[in-house]
């Protein structure tokens, strides 16, 4: 083998001859880039700007306003397509026939008479081809146009054009030109008008660069409303915007969005889309096919959703509403408290600021049993409602006023001696009349000279000896909370972090998980406690522009006479509640009518029973409708020819010749009957009626919650 061949063999991996060891090779260095690295491009904000510029016209209550196109209030007469096209074709053939008869002289020459009356003879007998073209052909064209206009109106050619031709010829609309700075919402015209040009330019630039979100826009808009209301100064807002841009005026948690969203939200209008109004004859024409949405102005009248398990109350109603309210809280517009069973689909824990897991030892927060109040009388009212508010019968313990008196006789002396309210075990002992704690209270009151409270304690001890004392009933109810699972909860010594509904003065997001399994009675009692604290604390807030909402995923056993009265007071306090029930049977019969009457937004989901449907049908009332009675009367022929024609028609069609008579009359009927609510609502649908805080109404609408 020659030297070249040897070199080739040594250069392959298969060669058995090793290479001689040489000096270590220097590590390979990548080539120097020809130019310094550039910063990554900024995200594109065109989608956000386009979303912000989308028109949101004023609409009926509950209509999804984002990109909405209003419809007429009355349904136009819709002619069937086959009848419309055949009529248009027949009209065209009639026009063609008329023109052919005129042009060929079958109808005489009378149609030329106007030309002979209004034109000189020299024009009609001229040898010039141009004059003849203008006079004769022009007049002929006018006659043809007159015939076509006449038959076109008879054949509804304009409707044929609108329904069949124009949609196929429609081209994509050209991009709209950018609006002026004083009209473009992405340019913050309100700030510019107030003289804050630098802040407006900073926000507009971050919107174009994709650094702003819908929550940021809503939060800064809320801060600007605070400037207009006098709560903040313009200089403070301008300084925050120039320093932090779209992150100005942050939520106390620092979050600018939720971890996950499942529903469609529009924070410009504050709406969350629940579904689509069905294209059904029972829905008003203006609502058919439009999106259905809720906002704080509708939730301010409260919402009641009734449907069996699996009908979509939590997934289709409660979850979107809680998402929307949490977004409003991040924008500084709302405070929300969500109460549901542990494990319910109410959103991840990261979407809330406070999560109270009652019965879970890993819970960071506790629940304040007395609602954060320091007034014994107020605490007694709320606690009595939670303990015995569901006892509608006026037997021992059924009257919450007597229970309130009993609790006030114990809470006042205990707080005067210990500087706090009693915990659950201590309260149980006091209600049971245990001698030791009562004697300790008596000694403490005597030492501090609290004679009035000492008389309250003496009255309580005298009442214990009487039969029918409500203290035993209250003690039995408190015993439901004095369980090992709740040993570390409801602490009043200050060693835990209790949450109080007095915190609803701030845009806070709260979720309270109830221990449904094994503690159903205690869960219902705690739900009543939260509702009672909510209705007691919300009306006393200073800032009522901050919308407060309580969402109860299951309100079974929660509706009491005092709760109904409290819900009625929420509308004027800028607050509302969302209640869900499997059936109205979970509400005492005397309270069903007042409950449905005090709540403005009512929803009946698919699978409702006829008994529940009857209550909804009564509260929705009746309306005047147009009823058509059609009567078919058999035609009897009297002549032999007529009888032969009728016999031939019967042979062909199989039916006797009849004449149809239509009678139209106005009748009053239920908007939705109990039978229709029970059997005519498809799966995944609901019937929803709305009332806004301003008094605007929407009739019961069939809504597809899956659309």
Image (cartoon, grey):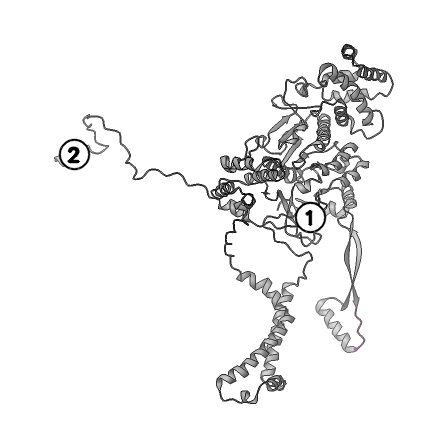
Q: Is residue 187 above or below residue 340?
A: below
The residue that appears at 46% across and 44% down in the rendered structure is: 44
Residue 702's label in the rendered image is 1
Tell which of 599 and 219 is nearer to you.
219
Q: Which residue is mark 2?
A: 7
Q: Is residue 611 left or right of residue 39?
A: right
Tell which of 345 and 222 is nearer to you.
222
Instruction: Pinpoint residue 342: horizontal percent, then vertical percent.
Output: 64, 29
Instruction: Pinpoint residue 278: horizontal percent, then vertical percent.
Output: 66, 50
Q: Main secondary structure of the magenta part?
A: loop
Tell which of 36 and 451 is nearer to you.
451
Q: How many marks?
A: 2
Neighbour tally class for label 1: few under 14, some 14-19, many 20 plus, Cα within 10 Å? many
Seen as rendered, the residue at the extreme left is: 2
Element assignment for label 1: strand
The residue that appears at 80% across and 53% down in the rendered structure is: 668
Q: Are marks 2 and 1 in contact (CB under 8 Å)?
A: no
Q: Earlier in the sequence, mark 2 or mark 1?
A: 2
Of the 4 image quadrants, the one containing the N terminus is top left
Residue 637 is covered by the magenta coloring: yes
Seen as rendered, the residue at the extreme right is: 466
Instruction: Pinpoint residue 106: horizontal percent, then vertical percent.
Output: 62, 85
Element assignment for label 2: helix
Picture quadrant where residue 427 is located: top right
Tell which of 147 and 547 is nearer to you.
547
What is the span of residues highlighted in magenta in the rendered image?
634-639
């Amino acid at each position: 083998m020659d030297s070249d061949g040897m070199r080739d063999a040594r250069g392959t991996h298969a060669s058995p001859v090793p290479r001689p060891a040489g000096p270590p090779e220097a590590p390979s260095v990548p080539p120097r880039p020809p130019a310094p690295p550039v910063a990554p491009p900024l995200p594109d904000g065109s989608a956000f700007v386009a979303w912000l510029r989308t028109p949101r016209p004023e609409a009926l209550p509950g209509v999804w306003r984002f990109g909405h196109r209003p419809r007429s209030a009355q349904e136009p007469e819709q002619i069937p397509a086959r009848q419309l096209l055949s009529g248009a074709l027949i009209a065209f053939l009639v026009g063609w026939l008329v023109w052919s008869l005129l042009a060929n002289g079958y109808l005489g020459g009378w149609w030329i008479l106007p030309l002979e009356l209004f034109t000189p003879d020299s024009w009609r007998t001229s040898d010039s081809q141009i004059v003849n073209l203008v006079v004769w052909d022009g007049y002929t064209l006018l006659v043809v146009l007159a015939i076509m206009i006449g038959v076109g109106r008879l054949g509804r050619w304009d409707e044929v054009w609108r329904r069949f031709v124009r949609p196929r010829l429609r081209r994509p609309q050209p991009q709209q030109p950018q609006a002026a700075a004083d009209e473009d919402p992405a340019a913050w015209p309100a700030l510019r008008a107030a003289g804050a040009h630098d802040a407006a330019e900073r926000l507009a630039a971050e919107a174009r660069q994709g650094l702003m979100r819908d929550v940021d826009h809503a939060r800064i808009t809320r801060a600007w409303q605070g400037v207009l209301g006098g709560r903040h100064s313009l200089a403070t807002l301008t300084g925050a915007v120039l320093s932090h841009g779209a992150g100005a005026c942050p939520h106390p948690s620092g979050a600018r969005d939720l971890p996950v969203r499942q529903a469609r939200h529009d924070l410009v209008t504050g709406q969350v889309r629940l579904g689509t109004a069905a294209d059904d004859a029972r829905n008003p024409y203006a609502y058919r096919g439009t999106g259905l949405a809720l906002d704080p102005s509708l939730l301010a009248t409260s919402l009641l959703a009734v449907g069996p398990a699996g009908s979509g109350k939590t997934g289709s109603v409660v979850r979107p509403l809680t998402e929307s309210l949490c977004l409003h809280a991040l924008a500084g517009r709302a405070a929300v408290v969500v109460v549901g069973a542990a494990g319910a689909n109410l959103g991840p824990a990261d979407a809330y600021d406070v999560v109270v897991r009652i019965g879970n030892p890993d819970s960071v927060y506790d629940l304040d049993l007395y609602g954060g109040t320091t007034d014994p009388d107020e605490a007694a009212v709320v606690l009595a409602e939670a303990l015995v508010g569901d006892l509608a019968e006026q037997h021992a313990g059924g009257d919450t006023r007597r229970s309130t008196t009993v609790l006030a006789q114990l809470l006042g002396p205990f707080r005067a001696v210990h500087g706090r309210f009693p915990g659950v075990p201590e309260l149980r002992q006091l209600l049971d009349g245990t001698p030791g704690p009562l004697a300790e209270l008596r000694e403490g009151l005597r030492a501090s000279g609290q004679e009035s409270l000492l008389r309250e304690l003496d009255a309580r001890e005298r009442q214990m000896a009487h039969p029918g004392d409500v203290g035993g009933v209250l003690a039995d109810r408190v015993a439901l909370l004095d369980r090992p699972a709740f040993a570390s909860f409801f602490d009043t010594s200050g060693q835990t972090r209790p949450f109080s509904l007095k915190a609803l003065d701030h845009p806070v997001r709260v979720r309270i998980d109830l221990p449904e399994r094994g503690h159903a009675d205690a869960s219902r009692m705690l739900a009543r406690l939260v509702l009672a604290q909510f209705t007691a604390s919300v009306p006393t807030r200073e800032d009522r522009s901050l919308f407060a909402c309580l969402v109860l995923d299951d309100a079974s056993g929660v509706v009491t006479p005092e709760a109904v009265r409290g819900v009625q007071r929420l509308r004027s306090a800028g607050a509302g509640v969302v209640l869900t029930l499997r059936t109205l049977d979970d509400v005492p019969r005397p309270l069903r009518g007042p409950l449905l009457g005090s709540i403005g937004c009512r929803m009946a989901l698919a699978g409702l029973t006829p008994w529940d449907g009857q209550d909804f049908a009564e509260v929705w009332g009746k309306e005047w409708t147009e009823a058509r009675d059609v009567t078919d009367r058999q035609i009897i022929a009297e002549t032999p020819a007529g009888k032969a024609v009728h016999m031939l028609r019967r042979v062909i069609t199989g039916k006797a010749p009849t004449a149809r008579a239509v009678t139209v009359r106005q009748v009053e009927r239920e908007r939705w009957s109990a039978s229709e609510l029970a059997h005519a609502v498809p799966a995944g649908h609901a019937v929803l009626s709305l009332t806004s805080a301003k008094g605007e109404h929407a009739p019961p609408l069939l809504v597809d919650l899956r659309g």
